[in-house]
Image: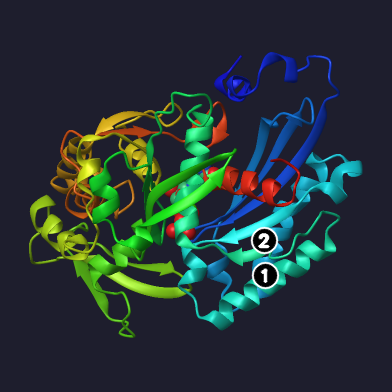
Amino acid sequence: HSNREMWFQDLFPPNTCPINAKTKTFYGIMFDAGSTGTRIHIYTFVQKSPEILPELEGEIFESVKPGLSAYADQPEKGAESVKRLLDMAIDAVPPHLWKKTPVVLKATAGLRLLSEEKAQALLSEVKEVFEESPFLVPEDSVSIMDGSYEGILAWITVNFLTGQLSGQNQHTVGTLDLGGASTQITFLPRFEETLKESPTDFLTSFEMFNSTYKLYTHSYLGFGLKAARLATLGALNTEDRQMFRSSCLPKQLEAEWHFGGVKYRYGGNKEGETGFKPCYLEVLKVVKGKLHQPDEIRGSSFYAFSYYYDRAADTNLIDYEQGGVLEVRDFERKAKEVCDNMERFSSASPFLCMDLTYITALLKEGFGFRDNTLLQLTKKVNNIETSWTLGATFHLLQSLGITY
Ligand SMILES: O=c1[nH]cnc2c1ncn2[C@@H]1O[C@H](COP(=O)(O)OP(=O)(O)O)[C@@H](O)[C@H]1O
Ligand SMILES: [Ca+2]
């Protein structure tokens, strides 16, 4: 028995858990329209009897790049990329369950940054694709998700998958998500101080699996890894299409980069300084004093995924399949190694130094973590992706009355 199969058993006495009950299988389809890509998660659940909560049996996962926001001026093409993924669900879900299987798409920071008009055009094209499919299309099935939900739902996913939401001894873990355009921090405060000292919109009560959690969560729009690159280059919110230079890039580099449908030209400091020190100072301007720092998190450990995971894996700080545990200082050590030897890492992304330096500054100066704060880098738990989409699917099934 894995954690996943066991998680609900503490909640129910054995006599309400009949072994011979009729098993019911059902599905949920959740799209994550992220700023850098669109992903489909097809979850399978089994319910062994009506009185107990269903178990998660498995997940089918597929993704495409770029994200919907890259189709800001061609919404039909954006919707087409969603349709290709949805066709997978036609094969994965048995035909007699199509009509009972809900399909939902939630967009995150990429669409939050577009104009209302362009975002709506994309969403309504996607809605049409859904309406033409054989699946259950709930009201509000295609929307831009509120940033605070993004953090909460990822927290639900990780703590569900690690078995922390069942039974009496709940030792929940905080979560850190670093996307392309925004970043989230979420944890369950243990100290009265945190509740008193946090801005009120950083605290949200959330009901799930018959419990209410009062969580600290915030989504920082514009602080995702790719948005931070633009901010560091000074290219954010400017109509200026000049060449942007940085000490975080290889000296001789001159190149172009597309993000959010805009083309940017960038390059290294041909004559001036390069390396970790000047780079850290550049990046510091982006984060210093911009984030709320709850005292409580300084000593606790967090689960971290998305770009924290990707960059740690790219530089062999962790194994790409297994993940691993790091200290905040490991990111700093690696940033120094890469930034001070850029020629040696020239085959990797030219942004590797900037990305690692940003992650270091975000953790230390942004959130206020200590050098020895532990980070559990995780991509999957029991073969299920650590993504807000699972939490969102539970929430969806609950609201449709499919589960409690
Ligand atoms: O299902 C998933 N499992 C693991 N990582 C994911 C999943 N979906 C997205 N990611 C990670 O999220 C990061 C990209 O962020 P995203 O495109 O979602 O931007 P956003 O959250 O700012 O909108 C990448 O590091 C990518 O590997
Ligand atoms: Ca994301």
Under circle 1, the secondary element is helix
Can you say whether 7 is above or below 388 in the image?
above
Whole-percent x, y for residue 330 in the image: 21, 35
Whole-percent x, y for residue 285 in the image: 16, 65
Res. 335 image quadrant: top left
Q: Residue at x 90, y 43 (%)?
A: 95
Q: Residue at x 52, y 39 (%)?
A: 157
User: Is the shortest distance between ligand 1 and the CB of mark 2 under 8 Å?
Assistant: no
The residue where tag 2 is placed is: 81
Amino acid at dot 2:
Ser
Whole-percent x, y for residue 91 in the image: 81, 42
Residue 262 left/right relative to 66: left
Asked if disc 1 and disc 2 are in contact, CB closer than 8 Å, the reply is yes
Residue 356 at least partly seen? no
- Residue farthest to the right, as pictured: 96
- Residue farthest to the bottom, as pictured: 239
Residue 381 left/right relative to 373: right
Task: Please state the total of marks drawn on the protein image.
Answer: 2
Q: Residue at x 7, y 65 (%)?
A: 272
Can you say whether 120 is above or below 109 in the image?
below
Question: Residue 32: which disc?
Answer: none
Amino acid at dot 1:
Lys
Q: Residue at x 84, y 64 (%)?
A: 132
Res. 77 image quadrant: bottom right
Whole-percent x, y for residue 2 in the image: 58, 18
Where is the N terminus found, in terms of image quarters? Answer: top right
**Gap between marks 1 and 2, in whole Å?**
7 Å
Q: Nearer the viewer, residue 201 or 271?
A: 201
Can you say whether 95 is above or below 137 in the image?
above
The residue where tag 1 is placed is: 77
Can you say whether 41 is above or below 235 in the image?
above
